[in-house]
Amino acid sequence: MTKITFRLPAEDRIVSGEPGESIMQVAVQANIPGIVGECGGDMSCATCHVYCEDQSGFKRISADEEDLLELADAVRDTSRLSCQLKLTQSTAEVTVEVPQ
């Protein structure tokens, strides 16, 4: 089980996720505000945009993900689509910031 901290404008919310789940799936199930996941994780909407400082446990960003992030507001160097951040057995803890 992975501990995921969602940094929101007014508070931090901590939830747990299972290997194989994406951070977007966990966020939608936990009703985390600001993460919609309109496309269900098909990487076609950018409504699951987050900032992730430590991306060492995840696949590198793909060219398709970079292209889609161009549609998101307030993109930073640490921007990712949370549907593309899949939890693994070795992912013990992760913190993501949800854009305002």
Image (cartoon, grey):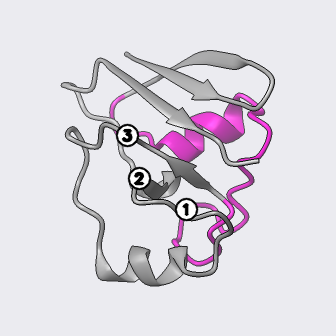
Amino acid at dot 3: Glu
Q: Which residue is mark 1?
A: 41
Task: Say which of 79 and 42 sits in front.
Answer: 79
Amino acid at dot 1: Gly
In the displayed structure, 67 sits above or below 43; it is below
- The answer for how far apart the CA atoms under marks 2 and 3 are is 6 Å
Q: Residue at x 31, y 81 (%)?
A: 63
Q: How many marks?
A: 3
Magenta span covers which residues?
A: 19-47
Q: Are marks 2 and 3 in contact (CB under 8 Å)?
A: yes
Task: Say which of 18 and 95 sits in front.
Answer: 95
Amino acid at dot 2: Thr
Q: Which residue is mark 2?
A: 78
Query: Crowdedness of circle 3 by 10 Å Cα count: few (<14), some, many (20+)?
Result: some
Q: Which residue is mark 3?
A: 53
Q: Residue at x 69, y 41 (%)?
A: 28
